Structures are given as structure tokens and as C-alpha cells.
Image (cartoon, rainbow, N blue to C red):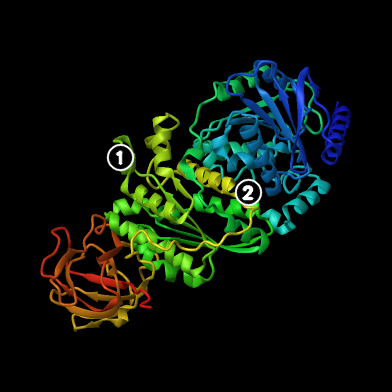
Amino acid sequence: MLKLLLVTALYCISFLCRAQNDKLPEKHLWKGFELVYHRIGAHTAYMVKPANPLPGNPWIWRASFPDWHTEMDSLLLAKGFYLGYVSVDDQYGSPYAMQVWDRFYQYAVDSLSFAPRVAIEAVSRGGLYAYGWARRNPDKVTCIYGEAPVCDIKSWPGGKGAGQGSPESWKQLLGVYKMTEQQAMSFSDNPVDHLDGLASFKVPLIHLIGIHDEIVPNAENTYVLAQRYESLGGPVLIYPVTMGPQELGGHHFPIEHADWWAELIIKNSYPVKQVLPYDSYITVRDGLRNAFSVFRAHKKATVAFLGGSITYNPGWRNKVGKWLEERFPETEFHFIAAGIPSLGSLPHAFRLQRDLLDSGRIDLLFVEAAVNDRGNGTDSLTQLRSLEGIVQHAKKSNPSMDILLMSFADPDKTGDYNAGIIPVEIANHERVSEHYGLPSINLAKEIRDKIANHEFSWEYDFKDLHPSPFGQELYFATIRRLLEVAAKDSGSPPVDRHLPRAPLNRMAFETGIYYPIESARHDSGWTLDPHWTPSDSTGVRDGFVHVPMLVASIPGATLTLPFQGTAIGVAIVSGGDAGVISWSVDNGPFTKKDLFTQWSSQLHLPWYLLFDGALKNTKHVLKLRIDEDKNKDSRGHACRIVYFLINQKDRS
């Protein structure tokens, strides 16, 4: 039997390799079903057609060894499933192979109208492909069926544990992954790793194993994966095959009850669920042609992420970075993670220079602010001036910079959409995007619509405005879709992205900066603490502790700040003792502002206040004092200033 398998495999590999270099062969029959070849770049693929396709065109995708144990495939074809395969067997699930799989999937779904979610069949080394792609695309998989699947390269082909391994295959794997032996031993992107996203989508796993497999030992592969997956809440079924001959050290075994496994795949894949397409929530506009051109031509690029906690937390941002590195493997990327929890468009506009632009040329900028703009109570005009200011400021630093604006989800925005209202934050993001030709993504509407379409729930799946692994995967899937669509136009020449002559608002904060606290003149009620740390156990934010702060806690303490510009404000730290301040500009009337927030009792919160955003572009003087009043929930009168905020326009 083993000899027959090897002869068959060698014939198939030889045939497919010839097909990759020659004209595609004519269609023919496979197990009585029509087989049609396709070209995916340099790789040959094929689809096997059922005689009577089921509605929605469900399909199963074989990862490797397409002519091994075909009983279940024949049953599925007879039931109306399509069968697909693309030949990348010498790639061991490498990042390059994943790119080929991506193109094959898009061809199957976009050109052949196959179902958007597919069942994957993983035999032996096919586990490296199946789990590599499924972990990158959990939203696109109905279930995974495996026969003794490889789940860790160190086990096979590495042979670094109890298994025999394959020195020749190990050498080949190191070559296609471009890794040294030492790097491979610490490799952490095996099928057994990073299963949280797949588990969050509840993708069922079915593994048939030989109980004494010496080639792919269960204790290093299936058992490890199953334990981790189940602990994350993922469903998994293991079926040990004990009947019939156990060949090749127990790695080859007959398939018992092929009809059982076919039925399980059908139950998880049909009827085909109608999901709302990602394309409905992305707007490409002028695209990302310049950034993609840099990625391809210059081989060095900087990608920056500006946002709040949803950008700060690990999740979609890391996945975008990994996607870019795999899509452009010859490019050296520098990623700047400039997410700071609690901050929205106003803080972004004034910290852009220090936190991003001072680092050098940026080629692609991701911006999100919609969630914190609602939570922080930022008014619509300030949102517009801030978002437009970010775009203008960024474009002046590099006119070729591509910028993507994203609006994330929260219950308030879902409530607005349910009431037939476009959330003001979304409207402002889209208004700025449209005016400047920027791509944008409305994730808030997508989440609302998909919940209404009964694809998932907020309570049990998405869970919070700080998304669960499920939500992070969904965010990434939509962002990735925009990147894929934009990439289709990336072969066109780069374009000059000049700013429109007329801004949306002439008072946009396009030169927002942090102005040093040392510039203030103050009385003895204020002290400059060069290394501020809290005196209580309340939490702090990174970047807003062990830094200089101008501090006062006695009512009547006063400071003045001479400045020039069209906007003035402060960035403070608001803790449980935050007080009330009064401020005026140019000897105008004083305005009171309570510094205590709903979060101040639990956190020394970075809090940004805009005093005036529509001043003449001349010299001014800010006066600020600690007020006698305080919030009833506050323990004191403290004001801790980290930065002044100034929009210092060019007077020319």
C-alpha cells in the first residue's frame, strides 16, 4: 500500500509541476466528476464540479495529497459540494504559500461564486497549510477535517521530539521559511500557536489519528493543539483509528466511516450562511497607490497607527503588520504603534508631530478616533477641525503619504444606527475622507448590520467596545479586504496628493503641537515636578507618568502663558483629587472647567481640554487659576498639566 501511495504521489506532483510550466491540460473526469484546471500565478490549481451543485456552492479545500483517501471527497461531491486544490506542496505552509492560498480563495469566491466560507481538509503536512490559513482567516472557514495533521514543524519535519522527522524536508522547510535552525526552534507560528481567533469563531476541528503514530506523534501535534483549542473554547473532536493496517509507523491508516465525516462537514457548511460582504463597509476612493509603490520599489517603509485603546491593544494592528510583511516579504517595515488609551481626535491632532512625524517620513497612516470622540464628549466642530488638521499636518510632512480613516464600533453608535441616525463621529470621519480622497472603513455600521443579520451577537461574541479576539479578527478581516482591493490598483504610477485649495474648516488644527510647560509664568502655588508619579495607588497611563508636570493644588494658584496661534488648550492628568480651574484668554471673561471625570477615581486619566479653537493668528496670553470650587466626588483641587496645546499657524 505504501509503495502504491508513493508512486501515486510522485505521479501527481510530476504532473502538476509540468502543468505549472506548460499549457493547462484539458478538463477531464476525476472519480466520475468533471475536473477543471486553473492557474494561480505560477501554480496549478483545479476544481472538481459536482453534478448537481447545492445552492450557495459549498466547497471543500484539500490542502495536500489530493489523491489520498478520496472516499469522503467523492461523497461530498455526490451531495453537491465542489472540491478545490492548489499545488504548493513544497512550501510547508510558509508565508509564501499563504499568499498563494489567498489568491486561490479570492479566485474561487470572486470569479467562481463559491461560498465565502470553506471546509478545509488537512492530511499530514497539510495541517501546516490548513491551520496556517485558517488562523489568518477564521471568518472564512466552516470546519477543519484532519488526518494525522502536522501541527508543529519541530515535530515534523524537524524530528526534534519523539518523532522520526525528515532531514531532507527539514532542510527544505528552513529554506522556504528563510529561517536558521535556531530560529526554527523558537518559531511561534505553528498550528498549535495563536488559536484564540479560530476558537472565537467556534470553528469545529475533526482529527482522525493513528493511535501509535511515530511520524507525527500525537503528543506533539494533535493532543497539544486540541488541549489548547479546547481551553480557548473551541470545539474539537479526536477519533483514533484502530481498525485495519497501521502502516508507515502508524501514520497511514484506513479511514473508518467516511460517511460520518462527510456528514459532519455538510452540517457545518450547509445551508450556506448569507453573510454581509466586507466590501459594503469600505470606500477606497483614491486608494493606497503611493504606499504600495513604496513597499514594492523602495524596500523600506514606515507604517504608523494613530488611535486610542483599540489601536493600543494587541489585535488588528498586529495582524495588519504581519499581513504587510507577508505580502511584501522583501520590504523592511518600520511600524510605529501610537495608540494611547482614552485619546480621540483632539489629542491626536496635537500629539501627531511629537508622537509620529518627528520619527521621520511615514508612508501609510491608520487613524481611528470615533469611539473616544463619543466617550470623551468631543463636539462635532472640534472633531472636524481635529481630523482635518491631522490630515493636513500629515500631508504637509509628506504629500505622498496615504492615510486610512477607520470608525470603530460601540453601543452608542449601534443605537444611533438602529434609530436611523448616522453617528456624528462617523459623519465627520467620512466627510474628511471624501474631501481629501482618503480610503475609509465604517466598522461601526458593519458590526451593527452583521448583528442585525444574526451573524453574531455583541454580548457573547464581540463583547465590548474593546473587542474580544472575535472582534479583533472581524476588524482585521475588513481592514485586510480594503488593503486587498486597494492593492489591485497599486500597479498604477504613484500620484501627487496635493491638498485641496479650500479646507472644510479654515480653523483646522493643521499645525497642532505640544507646547512646553516650562514656557508658563506662575506664582508659588505651582511647582514644576520633573518626574511626576502619583502619591496614591491609582493607575496611570504609559507616557503620563515619570514625566515633567506643572502641578498646583491650592485654590488661587495662578499661571499665565504667552503664545501665538489660533487654538489653545491643555493636556492634564485627572485623578481622584482633580479640581476645578478657571481660564481666560487676553483678559477676557473667565470660564470654569471641572477637571474631574467619570473615570478619575479609578485612573490618573490623560485628559485634553480645548479652551479656544478659533482665535486670530496673533499673540495671546492665557491666564489659568485653581478655583475654590470642586467636584463633589473629588478629594481635592489638583491640576497637573503635562502639555499646553497650541495650533501655531504660519503667518505668511
Res. 7 image quadrant: top right
- Residue 580 appearing in the image: yes
Q: Give amino acid for label 2.
A: Asp
Q: Quadrant of the N terminus?
A: top right
Find numbered disc 1 in the image and state the secondary structure of the residue it sits on.
Answer: loop
Disc nearest the viewer among 1 and 2: 1
Res. 492 image quadrant: bottom right
Give the number of marks: 2
Q: Give amino acid for label 1.
A: Ile
For image coordinates 34% across by 74% down, the residue present is 648
Which numbered disc, 1 or 2, marks the residue that appears first in the sequence? 2
From the image, tell me which residue sits under label 2. 189
264 or 428: which is nearer to us?
A: 428
Q: Quadrant of the C terminus?
A: bottom left
Question: Mark number for residue 421?
Answer: 1
- Residue 258 appearing in the image: no
Q: Position of residue 372 (x, y in %)?
A: 34, 53
- Residue that protrudes farthest toward the left in the picture: 628
